[in-house]
Amino acid sequence: MEVGSSSGPDKNRVYGLSNTTAENLRAAYSVSTIGSSQSVSSTQSKEFVALQQHTAQFTEKYDHLSASYAQLKADNAQQKAEHDQLREFVMNMASQSGDTCAPPPFWPYNNQPPPPPPAPPLC
C-alpha cells in the first residue's frame, strides 16, 4: 500500500485499496477503537452509567418480587395445611357424634330456600 507523494494531485489517496483515502482510513480507525476508554464520548459514558443504574434497579425489583412470591407461596401452603386440618377435625367430630343427618342446607338469600322450579308446560 502506498500513499501518493506530497507533490502530486492525489496526495491523500491510498493506492491498492480502490478509492479509499487516508482520511477514510483515519475515520475507520477511530470507529474501530471506540471500545477503548480514551475514545468513548461523555454521552456514551453517561448512557452506559444510566443503563447500569436501570439494570441495578430492575435486579433489585426482581429480587424483591421473588422474595414476595416465595413468602406468598409459603403462606398459601400453610393456609392449605390449616384448612385440611380443620376439615379433618370437622369430619372426625361429625363421625363421633353419631349424627347421621345431613347438616341443614345453607340458604344465601335472607335465610330462605330458593323458589321452586317452574312447572313443566302442559301439552
Image (cartoon, rainbow, N blue to C red):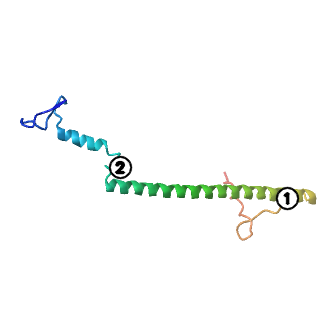
Residue 91 pos. (x, y %)? 85, 56
Left/right of residue 41 with respect to residue 100 in the rendered view: left
Residue 88 pos. (x, y %)? 83, 55
Q: Secondary structure at mark 1?
A: helix
Left/right of residue 18 with respect to residue 31 in the rendered view: left
* Residue 37's disc number: 2
Q: Give the mark toward the camera: 2 or 1.
A: 2
Task: Work out whether 9 lies above or below 40.
Answer: above
Task: Residue at 45%, 58% (x, y): give it.
Answer: 53
Residue 48 pos. (x, y %)? 39, 53
Give the amino acid type for the residue marked by disc 2 in the picture: Ser
Q: Earlier in the sequence, mark 2 or mark 1?
A: 2
Residue 84 pos. (x, y %)? 79, 55
Task: Residue at 18%, 38% (x, y): give it.
Answer: 22
Quadrant of the rendered image containing residue 5:
top left
Quadrant of the rendered image containing residue 42:
bottom left
Residue occupied by mark 1: 89
Q: How many marks?
A: 2
